[in-house]
Image (cartoon, helix red, strand yellow):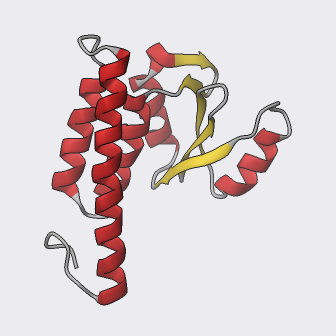
Amino acid sequence: MVYLITCDKCNVSKVGHGFDPKKRLLGVQTGHHHKLRIESVIDGGSGVEKSIHFKYSADRLHGEWFRRTPSLVLDFAARDLRDRGLKEIAKDVFLMSDCMRGSWYSDEEKIGLMNQMCNVLDEVERLVELESKDGIEFLGVA
C-alpha cells in the first residue's frame, strides 16, 4: 500500500509504502511536532511510490516529504478511482492533477479548481457507497 500522510498545519505530506499505514503514522507522529493524519491510501508498492516521488520531485522537501499540493492530492484520488475500476473518471482527475501542476493557474484558481474537484469526488464516493449498500451498478462497474 502507498500512503499519503499529511500535516495540515505545515502543508506537507509524506509519500511512503508499507503494509500498515496506521502503524507507520504512529511511528512518524512520534518524531513530528504537529498532528499528522492519513490522507489517502492506494494500492501499490515501492514501484508506485517511486513513480510518485519522481513525478513530484520538484516539490520534494526532504526524503519522502513533499509540499502538499493540489496536484499531489488529486493524483492520489485519481489512482484510488482507477483502482476501484472507475477508469474514465480517473482519467479526468489525472488530467486535472496535471493541469494543477502547470504554472498558468494562480494559486487562487488552483484552490478553486481543487474545491470543485473535491465536490465531484465527494459525489462519486457517495454514489459508490450507494452502489455497495444497495447493489446498484454505478457507471457500468458492478
Residue 9 x/y as whole percent:
67, 29
Asked whether 26 or 120 is in front, the reply is 120
Q: Is residue 75 left or right of residue 7?
A: left
Going 22% across and 79% down the picture, which residue do you hit? 142
Placement of 74 over or under 60, stated as above or below: below
Going 45% across and 55% down the picture, which residue do you hit? 43
Going 38% across and 47% down the picture, which residue do you hit? 77
Q: Is residue 16 left or right of residue 84?
A: right
Question: How many dots with numbers?
Answer: 0
Residue 52 x/y as whole percent:
43, 33
Query: Which residue, as the protein is rendered here, is positioned at the far right?
Result: 30
Residue 118 x/y as whole percent:
35, 46
Asked whether 59 or 51 is in front, the reply is 59
Quadrant hosting residue 91: top left
Asked whether 48 or 130 is in front, the reply is 130
Quadrant hosting residue 108: top left
Going 31% across and 56% down the picture, which residue do you hit? 81
